[in-house]
Amino acid sequence: MSEPLVYTVVVPTMNRPEELCKCLKLAIAQDPAPAELLVIDDGRLDEDALRSSLGKAAPPLRVERKERPGLVASLNIAGKLCRTPWLLALDDDIYLEAGYMRACQDAVDRHPDRARLAAIAGYPLLAGRSRTWRAAIRLAIERLFLLNGLAEGRFLPSSYFTDFECGRPHREPWAVEHVPGGLALWRTDVFRDLGYDPWFEGYAYGCDMELAYRATRQWEAICVPTARALHDKSPRSRVPNARMGELKVRNQRYFYRKHFAGSLLHFVCFHWALLGQVAMLTLAALTAPRSFGVRISEVAGMIAEICRPWPIVGGRS
């Protein structure tokens, strides 16, 4: 008989009570069910209302409050507080499909070396993602610029990775290097020991790929295609477009410099991808008048960040 996964559901949140409640209700309906719920709150969560909404049959709920908002700090705190062998980290706008944890359990049971397994990525389905001919052309151009590839969840020489739903489809679990931060089942000891890089504090764009990259240098991670969840991005999670453009450059450049710099091949591929990202967004702005202002603002943010000094990594600027 297989050893059941004993895990805690961890959800960082800030002033999104409806999304949080829906997320947790779908999580506690899983088989196997979580042993505990751990919410790291950066806002004004009504704990009593949440407990009442979840019902008396829900697993024990702990709410940890922080004065200073920040996703990275919330997740690192969760790693220290988690009391179970496994930790399922979810964004509060992630909604698990029925059978999610059963698929993860089956994948762990069939893994040839369970002791080497550090993380299991679920398969995220992004609400509103289209499969039109325009999307197909966009994906082809992204592959040309090394912003996407064929092997989902694997890093490219440019330091970017192939996103899920963008590469070859899989029917069975496969080895990955990227684990989506809001949809990840981690072995708690690995998660706690490695921790998220505090440099990413703030909006934390890209912090998940940096942690996953470090983890998969030492351990194994897999994606389970039948463990599916919908990422219905909350409109309250958006940042100003210019700021998002800055983050896309700043945080990717930090990641490249920390893990990929030093090779001429990686240098050329990274800057080629960066050029492609700016060019594609500019073209999208020019060909879609209704969203011109939004996209050109993001382009301006990217260009402004490209012109700034490089971020410091390990004492190097």
Image (cartoon, rainbow, N blue to C red):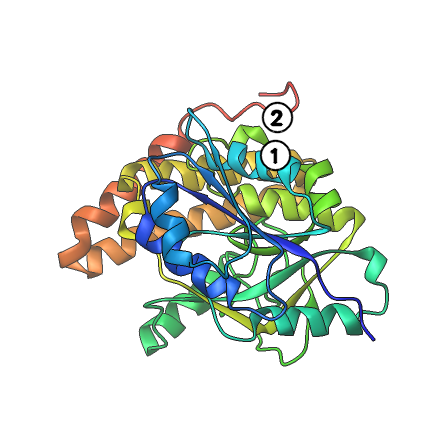
Q: Is residue 302 visible?
A: no
- Foreground pick, 292 / 62: 62
Return the mark for residue 313: 2
Residue 56 showing in the rendered view: yes
Q: Secondary structure at mark 1?
A: helix
Q: Residue at x 25, y 49 (%)?
A: 295
Quadrant of the rendered structure where residue 268 is?
top right
- Whole-percent x and y of residue 257? 61, 34
Above or below, 13 relative to 281: above
Residue at the location (63% across, 68% down)? 32
- Whether 141 is drawn above or below 181: the answer is below
User: Residue 7 location in percent, x, y?
Assistant: 65, 55
Cα distance in 3D space between marks 1 and 2 = 7 Å
Looking at the rendering, in which quadrant would you find the C terminus?
A: top right
Task: Work out whether residue 254 or residue 236 is closer to the camera in this orientation and state it.
Answer: 236
Give the image location of residue 79, x and y in percent. 64, 39
- In the picture as drawn, the residue positioned furthest to the left comes out as 290
Whether 158 is drawn above or below 134: the answer is above
In the image: residue 153, left or right of residue 291: right
Amino acid type, label 2: Val
Q: Are marks 1 and 2 in contact (CB under 8 Å)?
A: yes
Q: Is residue 17 left or right of residue 142?
A: left
| Circle on res. 213 | none
Q: Which residue is mark 1?
A: 257
Q: Residue at x 40, y 74 (%)?
A: 136
User: Between disc 1 and disc 2, whose residue precedes?
Assistant: 1
Residue found at the far front of this picture: 56
73 shown above or below 231: above
